[in-house]
Amino acid sequence: MRLNHRKLLTCHLCRQFRSILAQKHPSASVTGVRSLSDNKKGNGGNSYEDDYIYDEEGNEKIRPGGGKPRDLGKVLKDSISRVLSSKQDIPRTTNVAIVGGGLVGSAAAFFTAHKQKKNEHSIVVIEKDPMYTRASSSLSAGGIRHQFSVPENVQMSMFTTDFLRNIKFFLGELDEAPPDVQFNHHGYLFLAPREKSAKLAELVKMQKYLGAEVELFSAGMLKERFPWLNLDGIEVGSLGLHGEGWFDPHSLLAALKRKNLSLGVQYVDAEVVGFTKKYDKKGVSDRYMLASIISKDADGAMYETTCGQVVNCAGPWAAEVAEMAGVGTEQGLLSIPLPVRPRKRFVYVFHCPNGPGISTPLTVDTTGTYFRREGLGGMYICGASPESEAEEPSIDNMDVDYDFFNEKIWPRLAHRIPAFENIKLKSAWAGFYDYNLWDQNLIIGPHPMIPNFYFANGMSGHGLQQSVCIGNAISEMLLKRKYKSVDLSRFSFERIIEGEKVCEDFIV
């Protein structure tokens, strides 16, 4: 992609002008925000130098999010220097700060930027892993399905399918090739034994009522359509006919990020290490607002960015960000932590010369083991979740457990698809779920005690297929304070406070 450096420079300088004006005339979202220097003894907070924090040797540690207006000529000179250099510009203030630049965070940034009027909100996405080497979405199997037991999950995935079908309209750019996420519409096939056949039939009815194109197949119909299946112990199966399948998550993320940059969204390569808070001046409430974000770049330099609203899209590490904001570390309702933890999962790639053909759906066995075709030439990928807490793999590294494939997955695959008795394992990788320990479902919306701190966490393996809808829902909350497209009220943090669960039966 060819970059227009003149346009880039102009946009950057415009941001600097807005930053200067914000210092002279702070917007409503940043008024009354205390700087870190307010905590220093004997300091009235009136000196520009006092807005820095120094270490014991007198070296600058944190750069300010506010302070005395600077000389305009010097600002322009420094701005030009930064644009022409590789050093990124971390903003001093923003209306919306999104922590995590994966698919959920980038989708939230896109819909907010796309819907807002006259660029009324500045949007910054802070991502500590800019190459996405550990991002859940990039390391997933890429599946999307409409077959869930919770209606809202069905609706969220259908929303994402519609978005992918119209991706050229949403993410297309002039003079650029249209985005191609390589959507394979071969569906999901869930297999069920006799004791679960009635439940599966009931769920298919609900899914079809919501508009999903799903059909229930008897064992005889399955044998006719998929002769490569061993149907021992199988009574029925549900097959997604349209809108289900798999796609390339990295291509979607790249297209979202490119579009966001064209809409004025700023991506910052840094790690969030803390927040400052703004309490009720009268002291009559335990509620508070997040006033600014403290971030650290790759060189170890610390920055403070004042912010109006913060969205937690940190995936498997969302609980760490929530703790920095005070969730799970304070008193009362703030003593309840965000129940999201990393869970490692493996994806294995194998070759089978005589395996199922090109029209094979992503198939999920009764054991929870799944497989799908990967390209052409007899390549497939597969995986499964552990059967118990005791079998959960360590999250301290990205190592792959090949014994899990040999002892668990391969025997199940060979039983269900006899052709898979003759396969050759080619490669494998590990990735993380942002696993919701409470009920394995999304947590979304503002914290009741921190009104400007929003969750978009805990999808437990559904994040890729729900990411677009979740991003849209976050934009609706940020801009209109209510859900419009899909009502996700049931997934609020309040359900954890109240001890209520929204459980999903179709966990893969």
Image (cartoon, rainbow, N blue to C red):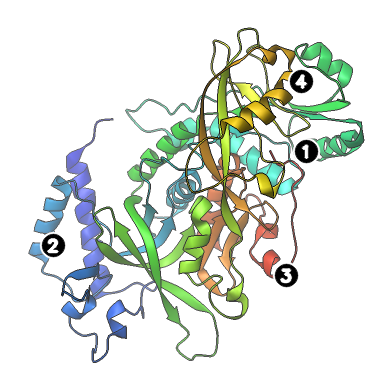
**Mark nearer the viewer, 4 or 3:** 4
Label 4, secondary structure: give it.
helix
Image quarter where the N terminus lies is top left
Per the model, the C-alpha gap separating discs 3 and 2 is 51 Å
Residue position marked by numbered label 4 in the rendering: 415
Check whether the beta carbons of the residues at disc 1 and disc 2 lie within 8 A of each other.
Answer: no
Check whether the beta carbons of the residues at disc 2 and disc 4 lie within 8 A of each other.
Answer: no
**Mark nearer the viewer, 3 or 2:** 3
Residue 345, compared with residue 363, is above or below; it is below
Residue in the foreground of this view, choosing between 377 and 312: 377
Please name the residue shown 22% across and 55% down the image: 14
Label 3, secondary structure: give it.
loop
Per the model, the C-alpha gap separating discs 1 and 4 is 29 Å
Q: Is residue 231 left or right of residue 315?
A: right
Q: Is residue 9 left or right of residue 489?
A: left
> How many C-alpha atoms fall within 10 Å of the one at disc 3: few (<14), some, or many (≥20)?
few
Q: Position of residue 2 (x, y in %)?
A: 24, 31
| Residue type for callout 1 | Gln
Check whether the beta carbons of the residues at disc 4 and disc 3 lie within 8 A of each other.
Answer: no
Per the model, the C-alpha gap separating discs 2 and 4 is 68 Å
Return the residue found at the far top.
354
Per the model, the C-alpha gap separating discs 4 and 3 is 44 Å
Is tag 3's residue or tag 1's residue first in the polypeptide sequence?
A: 1
Residue in the foreground of this view, choosing between 118 and 134: 134
Would you say residue 313 is visible in this rendering? Answer: no
Residue position marked by numbered label 2 in the rendering: 75
Is tag 3's residue or tag 2's residue first in the polypeptide sequence?
A: 2
Per the model, the C-alpha gap separating discs 3 and 1 is 28 Å
Label 2, secondary structure: give it.
helix
**Mark nearer the viewer, 3 or 1:** 3
